[in-house]
Image (cartoon, rainbow, N blue to C red):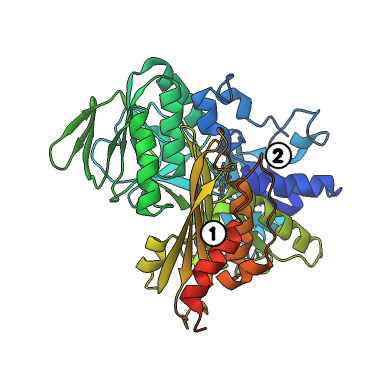
């Protein structure tokens, strides 16, 4: 829609990521037309961006994952009708007014209810050389450089991050012409970028500040993942401190220089909560919401990566940063606005990915993370076979549970409670197990509760040894006294 000077709508939605987009689509699909969606960048299927850069699963590249809101065959007719292109630059929650600033000037939007879905912004450590004056980046979006929010355009021309279509295009161009890359950060996104660049034929060095790669896995599982990386030619540096990004790569604080044509930061994100903070809403690390996704103002809801929510197993406030949750939360916020009594269940952060053929999953708290929170825990580890062990096609894997050994008053944790699940598998997705344990962990079940979980065996699909039964036996020894 052409930007008018002022607009009155029942519902204002801020942000065109999964949280905002799904809120808008749901309203449209429910026949509610009286809503406006403010979008400041091309909507994208973010989760697929690394695969668009890698071009193995998405040979067409980044353009394939841009969501064209005007494409009639997939979306409700006239979807663009109530989409404003621009950024909400001020929000007055008491006055129910917002200002949207776009290329065509300012629009004042008055609303009855608002859904804030501003997502998260990549965070880059404040290392010299990350910023320059070349003005070569992309306008309109932001990154955190340490404690400073800076425009993407201020990043040096050899520095990259991955959050939107513009980032993916830049990285895709880089992959086409570069031979060597440094990726900083070995979380799921860092690993997916490494894989993408390996698929594009680059020589990759992965740098991680922590003692082992991928903090979503405990050290022994992470070591197997690292072995996979190394066996595929990736150089891995752990426990490193970056001193500087230079025009020829990076320098570490011990003086080591690593040559690269580009440096890609996958060092996490921070919720985009500034607008909410300025509007006077309760904000901690993210925007505080209740189980109806309502903020501290009764007419304003927040969903997605910007919202801080309750963790299922521990009851602590967490930032899950998960796209599927953003969409669930959108349904809750929309339902509440329309008077339907839906609530968001507590959630548990998870990560599931595949790194150069090795599938991995992590749900809830690792043993290392739980110990760092001063929780008394132990672990139960189990080998896993993807088929009967005597079958040629069998591939060995590994399971690990984090289990509480003592009650914890602050969190209400019970002895035997399963706080986390990790798995490594060859040639097989651990998604089905991760989903099962996501429910187990979120519902605060104990190892003894595993007795109530059914197990299906079929030789072509798994090993006859019932892993739930095995875990139960192992747990009985540990928890006889409780
Ligand atoms: C590379 C990558 C891979 C991922 N893989 C997965 C995965 O496999 N599975 C999964 O579940 N999750 C995955 N995620 C996480 C998932 O993408 C996020 O959780 C999800 O995008 C959050 O959605 P959101 O709508 O809250 O925020 P975002 O997607 O960040 O969208 C928010 C939008 O709002 C805009 N905005 C901010 N402020 C304003 C304003 N004032 N006015 C207008 N617009 C504004 C932002 O610029 C942005 O476009 C991945 C993330 C990345 C980066």
Residue located 47% across and 46% down the image: 121
**Label 1 SS:** helix
Residue located 41% across and 29% down the image: 137
Check the picture and name the quadrant holding the N terminus: top right
Residue 445 showing in the rendered view: yes
- What's the mark number on residue 83? 2
Residue 328 coordinates in the image, percent (x, y): 68, 54
Classify residue 339 by image quadrant: bottom right
Residue in the foreground of this view, choosing between 381 and 411: 381
Determine the residue located farthest toward the top in the rendered image: 177
Classify residue 176 by image quadrant: top left
User: Which corner quadrant of the figure contains ligand 1?
Assistant: top right
Residue 475 coordinates in the image, percent (x, y): 51, 70
Crowd tier of the residue under label 1, counting other residues whose Cα lies within 10 Å: few below 14, some 14–19, many 20 or above? many
Residue in the foreground of this view, choosing between 177 and 424: 424
Residue 169 coordinates in the image, percent (x, y): 50, 25
Residue 214 showing in the rendered view: no
- The residue singled out by tag 1 in the image is 276
């Amino acid at each position: 829609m052409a930007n008018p000077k002022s607009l009155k709508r029942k519902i204002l939605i801020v942000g065109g990521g999964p949280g905002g987009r799904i809120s808008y689509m749901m309203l449209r699909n429910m026949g509610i037309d009286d809503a406006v969606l403010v979008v400041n960048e091309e909507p994208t299927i973010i989760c697929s961006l690394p695969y668009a850069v890698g071009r193995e699963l998405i040979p067409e590249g980044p353009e394939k994952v841009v969501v064209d809101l005007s494409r009639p065959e997939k979306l409700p007719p006239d979807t663009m009708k109530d989409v404003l292109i621009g950024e909400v630059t001020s929000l007055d929650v008491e006055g129910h007014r917002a200002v949207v600033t776009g290329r065509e000037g300012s629009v004042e939007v008055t609303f009855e209810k608002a859904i804030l879905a501003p997502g998260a912004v990549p965070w880059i450590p404040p290392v010299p050389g990350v910023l320059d004056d070349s003005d070569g980046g992309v306008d309109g979006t932001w990154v955190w450089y340490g404690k400073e929010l800076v425009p993407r355009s201020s990043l040096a021309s050899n520095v990259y991050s991955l959050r939107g279509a513009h980032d993916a295009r830049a990285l895709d161009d880089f992959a086409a012409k570069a031979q060597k890359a440094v990726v900083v950060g070995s979380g799921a996104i860092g690993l997916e970028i490494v894989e993408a660049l390996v698929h594009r034929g680059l020589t990759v060095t992965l740098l991680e500040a922590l003692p082992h790669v991928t903090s979503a896995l405990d050290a022994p599982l992470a070591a197997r993942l690292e072995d996979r990386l190394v066996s595929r030619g990736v150089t891995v540096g752990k426990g490193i401190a970056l001193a500087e990004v230079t025009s020829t790569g990076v320098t570490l604080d011990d003086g080591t220089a690593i040559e690269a044509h580009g440096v890609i930061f996958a060092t996490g994100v921070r919720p985009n909560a500034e607008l909410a903070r300025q509007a006077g809403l309760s904000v901690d690390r993210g925007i505080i919401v209740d189980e109806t996704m309502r903020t501290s103002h009764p007419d304003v809801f927040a969903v997605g990566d910007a919202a801080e929510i309750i963790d299922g197993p521990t009851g602590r406030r967490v930032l899950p940063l998960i796209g599927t949750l953003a969409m669930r939360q959108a349904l809750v916020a929309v339902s509440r606005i329309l008077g339907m009594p839906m609530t968001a269940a507590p959630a548990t952060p998870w990560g599931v990915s595949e790194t150069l053929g090795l599938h991995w999953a992590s749900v809830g708290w690792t043993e290392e993370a739980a110990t760092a929170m001063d929780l008394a825990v132990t672990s139960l580890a189990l080998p896993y076979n993807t088929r009967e062990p005597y079958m040629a096609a069998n591939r060995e894997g590994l399971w690990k549970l984090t289990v509480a050994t003592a009650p914890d008053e602050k969190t209400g944790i019970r002895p035997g409670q399963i706080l986390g699940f990790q798995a490594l598998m060859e040639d097989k997705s651990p998604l089905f197990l991760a989903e099962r344990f996501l429910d187990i962990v979120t519902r605060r079940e104990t190892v003894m509760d595993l007795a109530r979980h059914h197990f299906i065996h079929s030789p072509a699909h798994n090993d006859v040894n019932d892993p739930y039964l095995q875990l139960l036996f192992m747990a009985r020894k540990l928890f006889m006294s409780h």
